[in-house]
Image: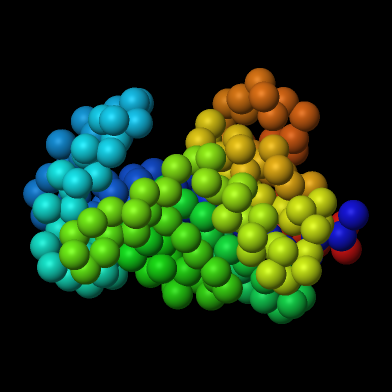
Amino acid sequence: MPVRFVAFDLDGTITRGATICEGLAARIGRLERMRAIEKLTTRAEIHAARYEMLEWYGPLPAALAWEALPGVALAPGATEAFAALRARGVPTAIISVTWTFAVEAFASRLGADAWVGTKATPERRIEHFWPEDKPVWLKGQAASRRIRLEDVAAIGDSRGDVPMLAAVGHPVFVGTERPEEIAHVEHAPNGDLREVVERLLARQ
């Protein structure tokens, strides 16, 4: 099956080390609190924490995202992976549960064709995006391009990416410990994204 569309998770997949939210928090002196938030597991806790974070960022969170970019490390081969896909005419998307304003900053930096995340409105409301929303959004993007999910590749690194990886024809897991639910998928722990993409493109 050819690869006609590639979706990437952001934290831990396109980036390595500090998360996007940790990079934002470091700019405003909230890193220790953010590290505690990163350990939360229940939907209610994360829901409340997102509103707490939004209060930190002030009226121009997009500007803060651009300031934080240099403090968040890209994965090896990330820039080259997007360039290779662009050269072959394969559209790309970044799908993340983190803030849309931060996702958009990385999408602009890498040249992604589409992106999605948790949206903060000008009225300071939050349009939440969760792991189970990833395959739904991806399916809509693929359909709008008349691409079957069997011809879509998705690259992720955590349990939150399982719903997305389970939905596509070419899943790749780059996290260290692959969840049992996706034990059948390609595993490239901490993989160089250029090498991952080259393997995907070889299926064309």
Q: Is residue 34 above or below residue 6?
A: above
> Percent position (x, y) of residue 200?
78, 56
Quarter location, residue 179? top right
Quarter location, residue 186? top right
Q: Residue at x 62, y 56 (%)?
A: 138
Q: Residue at x 34, y 45 (%)?
A: 18
Q: Is residue 81 visible?
A: no
Q: Residue at x 51, y 71 (%)?
A: 110
Indicate how the structure is coloured in the image. Answer: rainbow
> Percent position (x, y) of residue 176?
56, 31
Q: Nearer the viewer, residue 112 or 79?
A: 112
Count of labels shown?
0
Image quarter where the C terminus lies is bottom right
Image quarter where the N terminus lies is bottom right
In this picture, residue 115 sits left or right of residue 143: left
In this picture, residue 86 sits left or right of residue 67: right
Q: Residue at x 34, y 26 (%)?
A: 42
> Percent position (x, y) of residue 113?
58, 73
Q: Is residue 134 visible?
A: yes
